[in-house]
């Protein structure tokens, strides 16, 4: 699903609420019938780590680490052993086309490669939901198209829910459903 609308309307805030990074002022967020905000902080963090992947416009990669180390962080935080976390990260980095860049410092990767590392990091735990906030907003047209195609392929391959906030009409058009935020409501977009 693509969420579109003018800047400042609340698209990113909505995504942050879906991902439990922000709490709603009112209402509930249900995931498989469970109000996720009724969970204590430890269980909420575990839910986020296991069930939700995040990709942002700005990669938020750890500059002092290489691609493999960045991608393994969610698995390592989850409590996976270092060898298991490294294996999981390597598998997903290979899947996103970075087989030859595993040990490169992320500061020496191109913008498109950095975004693929961020995508691998978001997918390393095989989340049920991937939330992407302007995932190609900082990329040139060629790299953006490659990331769009990769997002769609991984969505099908992993069978996950994909929610993308975007101003990019090409990316929005790829989604099965498009909604616009208008007047505090989600409206289906034609």
Image (spheres, grey):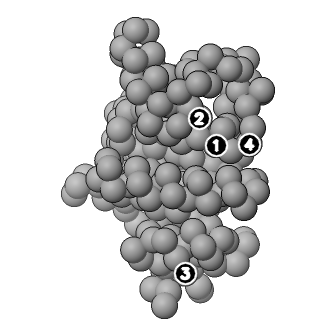
Whether pointer 4 and pointer 1 mark residues with C-beta atoms closer than 8 Å, the reply is yes
Q: Residues within 10 Å of mark 1 (few under 14, many from 20)?
A: many
Q: Secondary structure at mark 4?
A: helix
Say if residue 74 shows up in the picture. Answer: no
- Taking depth in this image into account, of 40 and 62 the one nearest to the observer is 62
Disc 2 versus disc 4: distance between alpha carbons?
Answer: 10 Å
* Image point (53%, 37%), residue name: 97
The residue pinned by badge 2 equals 117
Mark 2 packing: few (<14 Cα in 10 Å), some, or many (20+)?
many
Q: Nearer the viewer, residue 166 or 183?
A: 166
Where, quadrant-wise, is the N terminus in this rendering?
bottom left
Dot placed on the residue nearer the N-terminal end, 3 or 2: 2
Among all residues in the image, which is located at the extreme front? 100
Where's residue 66, x and y in %?
Answer: 65, 19
Q: Of the residues under marks 4 and 3, which one precedes in the sequence?
A: 4
Foreground disc of the pair 1, 3: 1
Disc 1 marks which residue? 115
112 left or right of 178? Answer: right
Other-residue count near label 3 (Cα within 10 Å), few / some / many at <14 / 14–19 / ≥20? many
Q: CA distance from mark 1 to mark 2?
A: 5 Å
Left or right? Give the position of 157 relative to 120.
left
C-beta proximity under 8 Å, tags 1 and 2: yes
User: Looking at this view, is 168 or 22 the one in front?
Assistant: 168
| Residue 150 visible to the viewer | yes
């Amino acid at each position: 699903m693509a969420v579109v609308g003018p800047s400042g309307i609340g698209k990113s805030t909505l995504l942050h609420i879906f991902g439990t990074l922000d709490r709603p002022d009112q209402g509930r967020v249900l995931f498989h019938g469970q109000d996720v905000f009724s969970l204590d902080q430890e269980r909420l963090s575990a839910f986020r780590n296991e069930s939700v992947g995040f990709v942002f416009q700005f990669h938020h990669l750890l500059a002092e680490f290489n691609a493999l180390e960045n991608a393994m962080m969610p698995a390592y935080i989850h409590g996976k052993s270092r060898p298991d976390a490294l294996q999981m990260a390597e598998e997903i980095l290979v899947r996103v086309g970075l087989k030859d860049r595993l040990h490169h410092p992320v500061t020496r990767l191109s913008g498109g490669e950095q975004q693929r590392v961020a995508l691998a990091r978001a997918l390393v735990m095989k989340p049920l939901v991937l939330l992407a906030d302007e995932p190609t907003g900082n990329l040139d047209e060629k790299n953006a198209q490659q990331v769009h195609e990769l997002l769609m392929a991984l969505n099908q391959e992993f069978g996950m829910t994909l929610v993308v906030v975007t101003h990019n009409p090409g990316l929005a058009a790829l989604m099965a459903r498009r909604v616009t935020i208008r007047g505090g409501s989600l409206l289906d977009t034609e």
